[in-house]
Amino acid sequence: MSPFLRTHNLAFAVLVISIFAIPGPMSAPAQSDGSDLSGPPQMNATYASRDPRKCTSVIAPPNQAQAAALVQCTMEVATSIGARLMQNVNVQIGAPRSFDPETDSRLKEIDAQAPILPLTGRAMSYFCSSVAFGLYHAGTNCAVTPMPQVNGRCWRTTFGDWKCSLDEPTANSRSGQPGPTTY
């Protein structure tokens, strides 16, 4: 093989490799869909449902999907009398507003200097009683309250992370329901 042909083949190979090595068009960072805030659901035999969702810290204002996940992480809890779980959370985020002492002072660890993100949306609220003592049976141990139109808010805490919650449901509970097993 001639030196010219060898150089030509080498140049061609470098060109091909460089074309495949060039990154694609630059784009904005992908927005989180909320699934990266927690691991997969873990089942809880005591309540025949999943455990409350636990999220990693969100230090920037949440997007819509993150706000829905943060509603679960902020509002869900398991106690000695039952587990409070949120399911099918779907929220919209409004324009940021200032802290209002009348409506926002009850928010845990709120940074009153940071903006509040108003929420509107819907969800299902579950309260699952323990099946451990035989008073309730798995699959019929939860009360479900639809939240078809509800307001809420996201706020930054004094620790610099964000939390979100919805206003409490008021009526239309159905007992004898199974508990949620997914987020």
Image: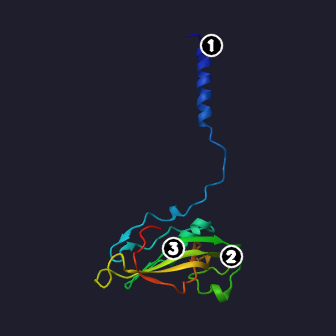
Q: Is residue 1 left or right of residue 140?
A: right
- Vertical relation: 137 (above or below) 16: below
Q: Nearer the viewer, mark 2 or mark 1?
A: 2
Q: Position of residue 134 (x, y in %)?
A: 28, 83
Give the distance between the C-alpha atoms of the residues marked 2 and 1, in whole angstroms: 67 Å
Report helix, strand or loop for mark 3: helix
Q: Earlier in the sequence, mark 2 or mark 1?
A: 1
Q: Position of residue 132 (x, y in %)?
A: 29, 80
Q: Position of residue 165 (x, y in %)?
A: 57, 78
Mark 1 Cα-neighbour bin, 10 Å: few <14, some 14–19, many ≥20: few
Q: Position of residue 58 (x, y in %)?
A: 57, 68
Report helix, strand or loop for mark 1: helix
Give the distance between the C-alpha atoms of the residues marked 3 and 2, in whole angstroms: 21 Å
Q: Which residue is mark 2?
A: 115
The quarter holding residue 51 reads bottom left
Q: In the image, what residue type sits under mark 3?
A: Gln
Report helix, strand or loop for mark 2: loop
Q: Which residue is mark 1?
A: 4
Q: Closest to the observer: 154 or 59? A: 154
Q: Nearer the viewer, mark 1 or mark 3?
A: 3
The quarter holding residue 3 reads top right
Name the residue located 59 percent from the left edge and 36 percent from the top edge.
Answer: 21
Q: Which residue is mark 3?
A: 72
Q: In the image, what residue type sits under mark 2?
A: Pro
Q: Is residue 3 left or right of residue 131?
A: right
Q: In the image, what residue type sits under mark 1?
A: Phe
Q: Nearer the viewer, mark 3 or mark 2?
A: 3
Q: Earlier in the sequence, mark 1 or mark 3?
A: 1
Q: Is residue 137 left or right of residue 97?
A: left
